[in-house]
Amino acid sequence: MQVSPRGGSGRAKTVPPGSSGSPKQASVGWTRRPLKVPSNLLILYSLRVFFSPMLFQIDHFGFAEDRTFKQRYLIADQHWKKDTGSILFYTGNEGDIAWFANNTGFMWNVAEEFDAILVFAEHRYYGDSLPFGNKSYTDAKHLNYLSSQQALADFAVLIQHLKNTIPGTENTPVIAIGGSYGGMLAAWFRMKYPHIVIGALAASAPIWQFDSLVPCGSFYKIVTEDFKKSGAGCSETIQNSWAAIKQKGLQWLSHTFRLCSPLKTKTDVINFREWLRGTWIYVAMVDYPYEAAFLQPLPAWPVKAICKYLKNPKLPDRLLLQNIFQAVNIYYNYTGHASCLNLTQTTTKSLGLRGWSYQACTEMVMPMCSDGINDMFEPQKWDFHAYSEECFKAWGVRPRPSWIPTFYGGKNISAHSNIIFSNGGLDPWSGGGVTKNITDTLVAIMIPEGAHHLDLRSNSPFDPTSVLQARLLEVHYMKLWLQKHERVKTCPK
Amino acid sequence: MQVSPRGGSGRAKTVPPGSSGSPKQASVGWTRRPLKVPSNLLILYSLRVFFSPMLFQIDHFGFAEDRTFKQRYLIADQHWKKDTGSILFYTGNEGDIAWFANNTGFMWNVAEEFDAILVFAEHRYYGDSLPFGNKSYTDAKHLNYLSSQQALADFAVLIQHLKNTIPGTENTPVIAIGGSYGGMLAAWFRMKYPHIVIGALAASAPIWQFDSLVPCGSFYKIVTEDFKKSGAGCSETIQNSWAAIKQKGLQWLSHTFRLCSPLKTKTDVINFREWLRGTWIYVAMVDYPYEAAFLQPLPAWPVKAICKYLKNPKLPDRLLLQNIFQAVNIYYNYTGHASCLNLTQTTTKSLGLRGWSYQACTEMVMPMCSDGINDMFEPQKWDFHAYSEECFKAWGVRPRPSWIPTFYGGKNISAHSNIIFSNGGLDPWSGGGVTKNITDTLVAIMIPEGAHHLDLRSNSPFDPTSVLQARLLEVHYMKLWLQKHERVKTCPK
């Protein structure tokens, strides 16, 4: 149970030089020792890949489109015990399911304790689960069935299919587990299909990052706090960088930031600044206590690593931006493999950015804003109108910002039960998460030293105590649900 | 509170001769005194008719179709009190909402007690709530948005709209109420949107009449029992009629049953027998203790009235069938207005039979069968394949028989709360209903002398004690929900 399918412990020795200690600017950049990417752990764990039979309706909610598609899912059943077992079901989010399986070590770590079958279900329109094959992203018509509701219905049908086909699982209780959007899906799955899952662990699930349920500024504020905490002068340096960029020419910026495509137009500079903004967000999200490769291969505590370059906010523009480059370079080129930086590839290719862009333009409208006072970013108001126009240009659809709260309940979810909402204090998404208990069975777990769903990652010797405690609590609650389920099953009223 | 917007009490004096006592065959039929149809009670109750603004998405679950439509709803607010009030929300079913408002006297009767606003919301594709106007029924493409899920989403959006626009209702608790399919919708509304309704009264809601959740024969068995209980020889006479029909010629049958269109083909005879089958079902459904005009204008205890003609199952075919005609004639021509009987019009025109046919061919697949042993009908197996073929021919769609249980939980609904399932012992639909408590807050109320949602009808001096008790219990539970809601609201954890 101590072997980690993913995570830092096994690879702590491969930490490249320069990732700790005070780096010298000149030595950083293009010559890092490559980080070993672990072999495919799916095989280690005899994780088997399946495609469902054609029983997944492309449209669960309408009948004119009656075609079906194959959904991919992964199963690991070596710890499964019929009489005492459970099914731990990962509600796949916006990406390749194998990548999520490899980054959800928690499930592997507890599989034996729960005598569990692990199932990782791929979300439609991502990875290999494409309703219309390579036409799936052609236009709004083909994308029409990409939604959280359709995905949840897929999960429901898949679980019924598994129970009908894996001998002995008919009455096996199922617990949904997910992180980020997958965590929202896990929580919503329990809310909408409590007959199918007895409970849900929703890690870093910002179910309230919608409409005006939380202030739109909380996200950037938390990112900023992370940088503030990780080094003196760090957030101020970033804050000052925005003005500095305006003082420098396109050529100089392109050269200094070693951009693969030089900046040529005003729009390019806007994109460049958006790319920087995104970079700080992503680093904050994956500010894990050990070397890892979730969104990108990164050193332990990457925000700290970055902040080592950003100690002096008062440097002249040129030097300040050179430092910003070194910082950014940690995120994009920790392996030392990159010969230039690419503005269009900000995270692992396992994430389905196109699909998420469509979802963000339909249901997943998460208002965000920065004011440059409570955060280190350029002021940017939440402009729904502009957002809607962009969506219409990009996808031919209009976002519906209040649909998610209408459908899933917004803040009024106390009628539901058996959901753990875990959140990391370092995670910008925690601002939209459930961070206080709602009822005895809708519980919140805070992990002050945790970034984005750290608790779902494999155990590591570098884990802060708070995440170890969180995992213990999560296991505790999950066992409570199973016990209660057992009691209800054997002692009906 | 004693005035009935509908129902028998006010019109008991108008019971026409011949409807009680032993009728003579010759005097029955075409000369009844017309039954007074009450004036439009909507006006009496200052029920106001509204059309929603265009905020109802035609497709709540997809984004390619972004058009909206106007939903009709009715409001009566003369008993509304801001601080203590509630909203009683009728989840409209397959028909004109005014007709349901006129046949749900219970809500009018309790409005004052609950300081309530009454809202009757029309189901999309029925009455005046047509998403594509008169093109709504053109083809499978236009019908694609006719489903229970879309209807529930309409209700959710409507309630939010009402709370946003009626001053003082922002925090007013809402209780869903419905009968039959409307009862299913009320129960499902609470299950899927517990953040919007604090509870639901689901009257005569056969939420388990799906897949193999209940035996397919229960429905016809209950119809048969009603006729058995209502007169010696009655069910046997009907049972014997099927063979008798086979012995008689088309012309004789057409003449004897005064059919508007004479039977000409074998298919016509099949339709004729289906029409008879349907007649017995409908009479059983509306076997109310007083004269009423729900599906058709009928005398008190219409099954008894019918059984008075069906005392002798051993009569020769000719006489037996002439009695069957007299019996049928009670149902189709109690007013004495009909000059002939029409095989295609079996119930009030307020019911949207086309829409329901489409729904039955998509989601609402309710398996039924008869064996001629436990029931008085010709044996008829549940033949899903044939059913599916018919649906495809009629609407170009295929039914999905397991979708409703998958989506709404089948028998595994104990995670939900605050739903009253009431059922009448005389109602054939009770076979698919919840007739035993599931938990302390999912309660069943049986009304042994009740037909189809008798409890939702107005109080009447002819009501059996069991329905009076049922209504008291219903009010009791609804008040409990309101009290609990109040406590939760004022004393948060």
Image (cartoon, coloured by chain):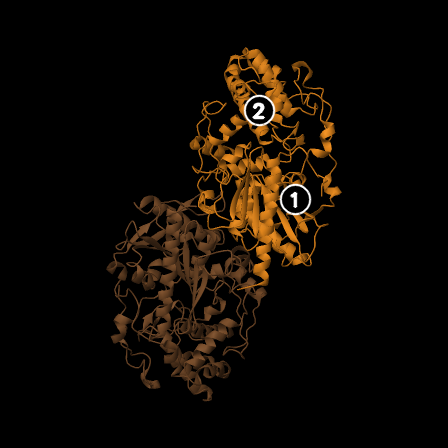
Chain colours: A orange, B brown
Residue with the mark numbered 1: A107
* Number of callouts: 2
- Residue B186 locus on image (x, y percent): 42, 57
Rendered position, B304 above or below B355: below
Image quarter in which the N terminus of chain B is found: bottom left
Rendered position, A236 above or below A123: above
Could you tell which of marks 1 and 2 lies nearer the N-terminus?
A: 1
Rendered position, A258 above or below B381: above
Give, as a three-letter code, the residue at label 1.
Met
- Residue A90 locus on image (x, y percent): 62, 45
* Crowd band around label 1 with a 10 angstrom C-alpha radius: few (<14), some (14–19), many (20+): many
Residue closer to the observer: A109 or A152: A109
User: Position of B371 compared to A290: left or right?
Assistant: left
Rendered position, A443 above or below B412: above
**What's the chain of the residue with tag 1?**
A
Give the numbered dot on residue A230: 2
Image quarter of residue A233 = top right
Give, as a three-letter code, the residue at label 2.
Ser
Callouts 1 and 2 in the same chain = yes
Residue B21 in sight here: yes
Q: Residue at x 52, y 22 (%)?
A: A270
**What's the distance in space between the residues labelled 1 and 2, CA to CA?**
30 Å
Q: Residue at x 39, y 84 (%)?
A: B309
- Residue A55 locus on image (x, y percent): 62, 53
Residue A146 in sight here: no
Mark 2 lies on a secondary structure that is: loop
